[in-house]
Amino acid sequence: MRIVCIGGGPGGLYFSVLAKRANPAHHISVYERNRPDDTFGFGVVFSDATMDLLVEQDRLIYPHLTRHAVRWDSVAVIHGGKTDHIGGVGFSAVERKQLLLDLQRHARELGVELLFQHEVPDPRAHLEADLLIGSDGVNSAVRRTFQQHFGQRIDLGSTRFTWLGTDRPFDRLTFFFERNEHGCFGAHVYPYAPDRATFIVETNEETYQRAGMEAFSEADTIAYCERLFADQLAGQRLVSNRSSWQQFRVVRCDTWHHRNVVLLGDAAHTAHFSVGSGTKMAMEDALALSQALERLPKDIRRALTAFQEERRPRVRHIQSMARASLDWWSTFRHYTDWPPARFGFHFITRSQFRWDTLADRDPGYLTSVQAAAGIDADSRSIAVEPAEGNRSELARLASRHSLALTRVLPVSDEGRLTIEDGRLEDYADMAGRLPLGTQLSHAGPRGACLPRRTGLDRPMAAADAWPLLAASATPYTPASAVPRAMDRSDMEQVRDDFAHAARRASGLGFRFLQLHFGHGYLLGTFISPLTNRRLDRFGGGIGNRMRFPLEVLGATRAEFSGELAVAISATDWQAGGLTEPDMLEAVRLLGDHGADFVTALGGQTTRWSRPPYGRCYQMLLAGKIQNEAGVPAIAAGGITDGADVRTVVLSGRAERCLLDSVRLA
Amino acid sequence: MRIGIGLPTTIARSPARLTLEWARLADAGPFASLAAHDRLAYDSLEPVTALAAAAAVTQRLHLASLVMIGPLRGRGVMLAKQVRTLAALAGAGRLTLGLGLGPRRDDYDACGVPFERRSRLFDEQLADLTPLIDEGIELLIGGGSRAALARMVRVADGLCHSGGPPRGFRAAADRARIAWSDAGRPGKPRLWGLGYFALGPDAAPAGRQALQDYYSFAGGFAARIASGLLTSADAIAAYCAGYEQAGCDDLVLFPTVAGLAQVERLGNALQGLL
């Protein structure tokens, strides 16, 4: 087979070595525009998990490549003059240049044709090869040439960063956070040899602008960063290597292959370096691609499909973790005046780690987080009555938690979800006696359904159903009845129903009230742009879409004396849904109109929402509500035990947590 | 947790008539259920038909498709008819219908159903199948993706996981329970798990080879799936314990070697557990 690789970075070289070794009859050429010993960047980091994967599947070459690796198993977070060490996080690193030279040597020994200082102006010139591999990095010419087939999407990250190096010895992965007159900065320091480390400095756009970095030369950048991190550098210098201030480019493609052309590594996908190194992903791609070709040597297109099917779920997982981490780096200015322990815990829980996963790695660290916080996280959980209604279970929950909520109750008969919905008065004998709150809703377009034992949104027989309301006349499912778009008199009726129900709840002695404005229920249909298609002053921009929900909140607030929360679907978990700036604006408006808390629910606004269910899967939304919009948040979604509550509350993302009604194994 | 046995209907070159003897023997064994996989472009038997035959020769065993590839079967009306027929022939409450998309493009190509439209076709089909749930037929969605979980909470009784070590099942089961709670469904989802076994002298290499062959579409995963083959009573005991701890309701162990001795051996291995 004749194989042409465009781009001689670690991914392209590693693939050629593996493929040539598996089948010496392959003729493989690697085109690289730089010289063999030109290299950009400093070290390459592999997590223990990656090492395991590559070691298991490549027993010949990979161990050799990592023979000089340095290894460490903890992370240091240095902020506000205090250092936190988090153990049990294992990484290895090698020098990028050494890795490339080793790969080049292996390739040469096996008979791979290496063509350095070879630009390939038009990759189509190599289409006659049996397989054309675009391993040419984030700015891939191969991807650009066939972009209509790959369906590329490139998003610019909202941070600015620069890659530097330092000779100061570091013994572990270290993060520094510093402030100066321009703003705040973080440094990611990855040692890759006993006395050398990659030193990435990252900041937000505003700080970058204030510092005037746009006009910086490399020398200016070095001088600025050396001054900024003088204490941590302890007299050592920073070194540059084509170190400009960049925005991270997140590359995604609908597909990674087209006919006999395939993308590999950064050319196909990138993920912010704080989560996974691009080199690591490129090498995993190389391994998977070479294995697929070995298995299906006679059918390249099937091999390319198999390669993508194998790699894409893993890459997507890393990209989703990286998205959360990149978001943290672009918003950490909100947290730099926090106490160091909370700051560090917030940082460490920004993407994949939670209390329960850290408990296996470094229980001592968690003890220090708990001690520094000085709050009893367990008192911050709110239990909820089972969905089918169970008063004795609710009483039991109320005895074990500082607050328990009834299931969602309708404000009126027209607002019922099913004929089995409860009523406020069902709890008359308990509400004043136990620490109870309640939840009020109007089901809107999801009303008049069968009980949820056998599925969601199954409409009742038309003869038994009642008329439905919504912001716009869109049925929730194709089988659902079409709701009426609310007119002004409907709005007044619903507003009064909420106010009346709040007065009854107050009178019964409930001490807490949550208004349910999410999940595609009536008020939620106003907030989401997916369900509000109105052309009047209740539709359009977020200010208009919030107009009726705020009117209901105002009327309810006037009638309820206890604490009041408003639950919203803070994301639709669907393309085209509520944007983050709109969500934050909605939260600010709710706070201004008397909500003591905003609860971060998500999805269910249409039947197409696809939430990424998992532990604490919506806690980052709660964090935005609390820290970016400035309204105390209640977190919800996949919070099932005390460890989850501690993750959320001790990281400062929410004041309280709604517990799921399930127990996990 | 209940433990069942798979039919040998997706082991290549397994004689079709073995299915009947296998079912009879399983019905007399310590198993709770009898289940069939589904593949089109493979040397295998079609699951509705195979389960109907199994229903005819068994009295007791619960019958399950784990999982049937829905979109290969067109709109749901005909499939609903077939499933109702099967459920009626088997007798009340004996059928679990696991439905999924299946990851294999060749199955779709083989019957001309566009692979790219499989999700939409599946949703349309499910709309025709949901009434089955009211007729006492348990409905499961196969897989563990976001879309699978969303479908599960909307229309099904639970989830059928695609197999593998208990750790992976536990993670999927947790997601399923969270999805269930988030959707406000009462109770908890029914959770089914899978495993593969080959017991007896010389069975292990043949079993691994069968898995490599069956999962050849899955690339590097095929080797991993094959390496998870359960080849001893101890391995089966550990696997069952892991699934039980993870909250599995029904675990089905599928054969990888065709031969009635496999039914006997699995029965013996489970005797110690039950």
Image: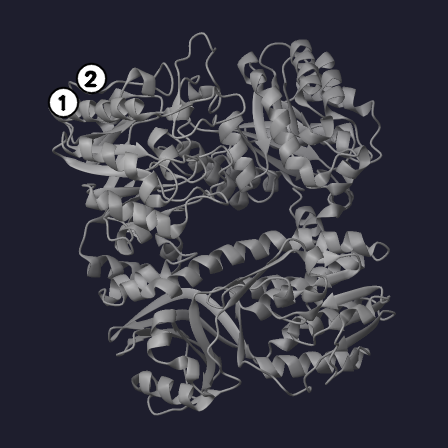
Instruction: Give how far across and how far down residue B5 sits, in percent.
Output: 65, 28
Q: Earlier in the sequence, mark 1 or mark 2?
A: 2
What's the CA distance linking mark 1 and mark 2? 8 Å
- The answer to whether one can see residue A70 in this image is yes
Name the kind of residue labelled 1 in the image. Leu
Instruction: Give how far across and how far down residue A115 sits, in percent.
Output: 77, 82
Dot label at residue A508: 1
Name the kind of residue labelled 2 in the image. Glu
> In the depicted view, which residue is nearer to us: A269 or A370?
A269
- The answer to whether one can see residue A69 in this image is no
Side of B21 relative to A609 (left or right) = right
Instruction: Give how far across and how far down residue B226 sits, in percent.
Output: 69, 47
Q: Chain of mark 2?
A: A
Side of B214 relative to A171 (left or right) = right
The answer to which quarter of the image holds residue A542 is: top left
Asked if marks 1 and 2 touch (Cβ < 8 Å), the reply is yes
Q: Residues within 10 Å of mark 1 (few under 14, many from 20)?
A: some
Counting the numbered discs, the total is 2
> In the depicted view, which residue is nearer to us: A245 or A542?
A542
Q: Chain of mark 1?
A: A
Q: Quadrant of the N terminus of chain A?
A: bottom right
Side of B224 relative to A111 (left or right) = left
Helix, strand or loop at disc 2?
A: helix
Q: Residues within 10 Å of mark 2 (few under 14, many from 20)?
A: few
Helix, strand or loop at disc 1?
A: helix
Tell me what residue is drawn at x 15 percent, y 25 percent: A503
Mark 2, residue position: A425
Tell me what residue is drawn at x 50 percent, y 35 percent: B244
Instruction: Give how far across and how far down residue A412 sits, in percent.
Output: 28, 18
The answer to which quarter of the image holds residue A267 is: bottom right
Side of A540 relative to A312 (left or right) = left
